[in-house]
Amino acid sequence: MVQQEPFKPRGAIAFFLLMLLFYGIAWFSVYVEVLRRG
Amino acid sequence: MERTERIMLWIGGVVMAVFFAAVVVLAAGFGVDVPGCITEVKPFERDTLFQRADGRYELHVVARMWAYQMPPVELPVGSEVDIYLSSGDVLHGFHIDRTNVNLMAIPGTVAYARVRFREAGDYPIICHEYCGIGHQQMVGVIRVVQ
């Protein structure tokens, strides 16, 4: 019988983290612009 | 719940908390605020510029098709201006370039924003709400000098 390693959704985790990173960059770029215009 | 799900949930929660804290810092620490809409006062029909104190001004602007009725504004660098905006006819926009001022001139109400001009130069004002055939001509300027 073949032993399977426990499933870990690596693709979904990577997608999620990249999505948060993208949101962070988009959000903070607007944030910095608002601060700059003061 | 899986361990990985819990970790992802925590990461998402922390990111949202950071976003929220950043907004609080912006409002409380740097005085950045959303524009106000004053509905309990009678809208003014005359444009005026008052000096309230040293470096503090109050500007009343009436937006009409298709110009801003406002006095010539020339201010020293560092001036803080309370802007009150009303409309004499239809809906207009009021955006001062290079600042956070972005108001709507709504007939029957007064919009309010406070702005500090930190750099010298001309700050163009544009109407960013389509208000009729002459909309594209609806511009103004605030001049900030040393």
Image (cartoon, rainbow, N blue to C red):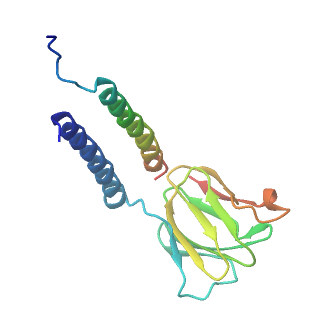
Q: Is residue A3 above or below residue B138?
A: above
Q: Residue at x 77, y 65 (%)?
A: B131
Left or right: where does residue B72 sit relative to residue B33?
right
How many dots with numbers?
0
Q: Residue A23: give x, y in percent of width and height.
A: 41, 39
Q: Is residue A16 above or below residue B137?
A: above
Of B136 and B121, nearer the camera is: B136
Left or right: where does residue A38 sit relative to residue B107?
left
Q: Is residue A27 above or below residue B144?
A: above
Residue at the limit of the structure toward the front, as seen here:
A1
Q: Residue B72: give x, y in percent of width and height.
A: 70, 66
Of B73 and A28, nearer the camera is: A28
Q: Residue at x 36, y 33 (%)?
A: A21
Q: Residue at x 47, y 69 (%)?
A: B54
Q: In the picture, which quadrant includes the N terminus of chain B?
A: top left
Asked if one can make out residue B81 in the rendered structure from this viewpoint, the answer is: no
Q: Is residue B56 above or below residue A6?
A: below
Residue at the limit of the structure toward the right, as seen here:
B133
Q: Residue B139: give x, y in percent of width and height.
A: 74, 59
Choose top left, top right, bottom left or bottom right for residue A16: top left
Left or right: where does residue B133 sit relative to residue B19?
right
Residue at the limit of the structure toward the top, as seen here:
A1
Q: Residue B24: give x, y in percent of width and height.
A: 31, 57
Asked if one can make out residue B42 in the rendered structure from this viewpoint, the answer is: yes
Q: Residue at x 70, y 71 (%)?
A: B91
Choose top left, top right, bottom left or bottom right for residue B84: bottom right
